[in-house]
Image (cartoon, helix red, strand yellow):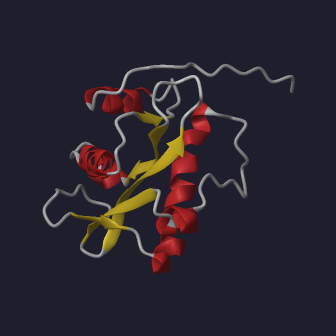
Amino acid sequence: MGELMNLQGLILREARREEHAALLAFEQKVIAAERPFNPALKERDAYYYDIEALILSPDSRLVVGEIAGAIVATGYLQIRQSKASLKHERHGYLGFMYVAEQCRGLGVNRLILQDLVRWGERQGIADFYLDVYADNISAVRAYEKFGFQGSVLEMKRSLD
């Protein structure tokens, strides 16, 4: 699957428990892609997600994009309690947004975002959040095209 693909045959569907190992491998791809933006990430044994909980929880939807039986993209929406200072009580948090290299630029991420936001709307959610590294310009642009705007800038200092 090294050649450039098209969207013909793309299936978006909920992830299945038996795909846990494949999803763990995709999680490592996400971490590898983000490592250049955050040198504090562990080189080994770094994990972001509780994949099984994302699959099983009624408050989350984990979807995969599949072509010819192979997973080529992932994303989830999790309904979370909002901070007490906000007008909305609950919001949707998006994560695990990853598209295999050979499928990038084809609109797969947009299709996953549309699916997840629609699902969130059906759950009564109107506010959606995600985290993206500020230096990850291509990801920032993709989310801006979908209507996201910058909000809070997390700052850090390391004494190492």
**Quadrant of residue 155 within the rendered picture:** top right
- Residue at 24 percent across and 55 percent down: it is 4
Which residue sits furthest left?
8
| In the rendered image, the vertical position of residue 155 relative to residue 44, given as above or below | above
Residue at screen point 47% across, 29% down: 136
Name the residue rendered at 59%, 28% in the picture.
Answer: 84
Q: Is residue 112 above or below residue 160?
A: below
Q: Could you tell me residue 106's position as x and y percent?
A: 21, 46
Residue 90 location, x and y as percent?
48, 39
Placement of 128 over or under 156, stated as above or below: below
Return the x and y of residue 81 as percentages of the image width and height.
55, 41
Instruction: Work out whether residue 4 or residue 23 is closer to the camera in this orientation and state it.
Output: 23
Drawn side of residue 82 relative to residue 60, left or right: right
Which of 54/47 is in front? 54
Say which quarter of the image contains residue 152. Answer: top right
Q: Residue furthest right?
A: 160
Count of numbered tags: 0
Please identify the quadrant where the C terminus is shown: top right
Residue beneath the point at 51% across and 61% down: 54
Query: Residue reaching furthest bottom?
Result: 18
Q: Quadrant of the N terminus?
A: bottom left
Above or below, comparing residue 89 to residue 5 in the picture: above
Q: Position of residue 3 (x, y in %)?
A: 26, 59
Nearer to the camera, 47 or 15: 15
From the viewer's perspective, tell me whether residue 39 is left or right of residue 148: right
